[in-house]
Image (cartoon, rainbow, N blue to C red):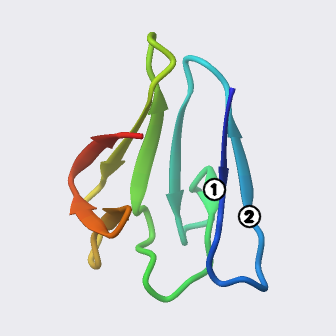
Amino acid sequence: MWTLQSVEPADIELTFRLLPGTLKTMGRAPGADFVVDAALVSRVHCRFTLNQGHELELEDLGSTNGTFVNGRKVGKAVL
């Protein structure tokens, strides 16, 4: 199982849990699996996939502001 936890802003803490074989979306839209109400987040911003090797993959879904991992803009990345 993977756990994603927010670090900024410091006054808001978000924790997401992913189990093997799952695919989850993050965005502002009510239909997103993980809803994040933030101005820089698109309606359907990115997708998390836990692959067969238990690696967490992140893919930008054409978001307006991009998706960043450790300060670097990515289209797709293994976390």
Q: Nearer the viewer, residue 21 or 43?
A: 21
For label 2, the SS is loop
Residue, far top: 52
- Residue 59: x percent and y percent? 32, 46
Left or right: 71 with respect to 23? left
Question: Is residue 46 placed above or below 2 in the rendered structure?
Answer: below
Question: Is residue 14 placed above or below 24 in the rendered structure?
Answer: below
Residue position for label 2: 14
| Proximity of marks 1 and 2: CB atoms separated by less than 8 Å | yes
Residue drawn at x 29%, y 43% is 77
Write down the quadrant of residue 6 in the picture.
Answer: bottom right
- Residue 26: x percent and y percent? 52, 57
Res. 79 mark? none
For label 1, the SS is strand
Residue drawn at x 67%, y 25% is 19
Q: Would you call the spot at circle 1 few (<14 residues within 10 Å), some (14-19), or many (20 or more)?
A: many
Residue drawn at x 59%, y 57% is 31
Mark 1 or mark 2, whichever is nearer to me: 2
Q: Earlier in the sequence, mark 1 or mark 2?
A: 2
Kindly identify the amino acid type of the residue bearing the numbered disc 2. Leu
Left or right: 69 with respect to 75? right
Left or right: 1 with respect to 66? right
Kindly identify the amino acid type of the residue bearing the numbered disc 1. Phe
Left or right: 10 with respect to 20? right
The image quadrant where one finds the N terminus is top right
Residue position for label 1: 34
Residue, far front: 70
Residue drawn at x 29%, y 55% is 61
Question: Is residue 75 placed above or below 14 in the rendered structure?
Answer: above
Q: CA distance from mark 1 to mark 2?
A: 10 Å
